[in-house]
Amino acid sequence: MSEWIGDLNEQITAGNGCVLVTIAGVRGSAPREVGAKMLVTGHETIGTIGGGQLEYKCTQIAFNTLKDEKNGNRLRKFTLGANCGQCCGGVVEVLFEAFCVEKPGWIDVLSAAHRRREPFVIATSPYSKYLISANGNIAYPKGCTVNGRLAVDAMRILNQRESAQRLNLKLNDNDNDNEDLLLEPVVASDLNIAIFGAGHVGAATVSTLSPLDCNIRWIDSRRNIFPKHLPENVQKIESAQPELEVAAMPAGSCYLVMTHSHPLDQAVIQQILARDDFCYCGLIGSVSKRRQFEKRLLKLGMPQSRFDRLTCPIGIDGIAGKKPAEIAIAVAAELLRLSEARGAGEKLPANVRILRQ
């Protein structure tokens, strides 16, 4: 996820010195992947690089860095077994970027692009930072020219939706030495979820799903039903006709239908199944509720093949609890398993379809 962009911008704009801590390299087993980040300020940490002694040591290093009150980068290597007493056994390289004096120009450029949902690759060397847009242009520093391989690799990462990775090359043809670069894609999530219903189960589901890398549209017909404060990736929608909001979702979306009204549930389900371009359509309820809906919609002319793609009851097998939090966890696990299988190109159940935007 890219929430660190907003957190970093907010801290620096407020005049708070901070250190951005990033997993820059991994060999063997490690608690987090390359690109994982946490932000350390003078009074708190935001995010995590995996916990344990590695995170504790990195937090202490970041705090000590803040005392210097200087901007700058620093790369440290940790052998998890020998240095941290962690049985993961791997080796982790960690990048510390201190922001104590002034706000670097790349933060404003990246923040603006992120708000516009434009894909970028951040390339970080020990001495500099570059922002490469989806067309391979260097957006920051403006007017800068570098080795063409950097743009090629950046576009490959974006086009193939690869994760963060290291690259060793000459940034400029006149350089004698190669530089180690950390290439990190900043791409809006393609996991789009529409949740119909802001009752207890809907609220618990949003609370469980929102920390994941996804975009949520939360829809209800009742006024003043939503909490005042919502995560950045959650958009609340009050609509007198929630079923019409189905049309606003992109192809390949996931839908969870859990409103306060069975007739409304049916109206929403009918619109989703009529589109037939969804990745997942889940309806809260029992097998008997599914049978009732199926009977009614078949009478209205819905093809059986469309209805076969409905998931009801929802949630992974083995969780029978009916408390809102239990349902939310079961549903989140089902969608997370679906998202990871989709990303890995694995075969999915017959009622689930992969649709790339």
Image (cartoon, helix red, strand yellow):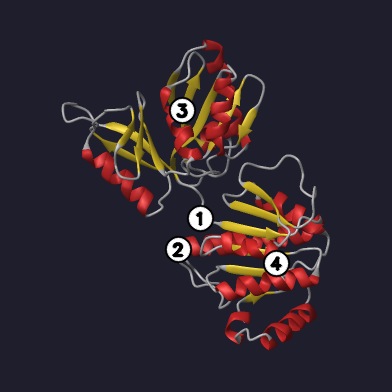
Q: Are marks 2 and 1 in contact (CB under 8 Å)?
A: yes
Give the numbered dot on residue 108: 3
Residue nearer the viewer, 109 or 176: 109
In front: label 4 or label 2: 2
Q: Quadrant of the C terminus?
A: bottom left
Classify residue 131 by image quadrant: top left
Residue at left offset 76%, top offset 48%: 226
Q: Which of the two labelled residues, at mark 2 and mark 3, occupies the earlier sequence position?
A: 3
Give left or right: position of 150 versus 313: left
Label 4 and label 3: CA atoms lie apart by 41 Å
Q: Are marks 1 and 4 in contact (CB under 8 Å)?
A: no
Secondary structure found at label 3: helix
In front: label 1 or label 4: 1
Furthest toward the bottom, the residue is 299
For mark 2, what is the residue? Answer: 356
Q: Amino acid at mark 3?
A: Asp
Residue nearer the viewer, 222 or 179: 222
Residue at left offset 78%, top offset 72%: 263
Give left or right: position of 13 versus 313: left
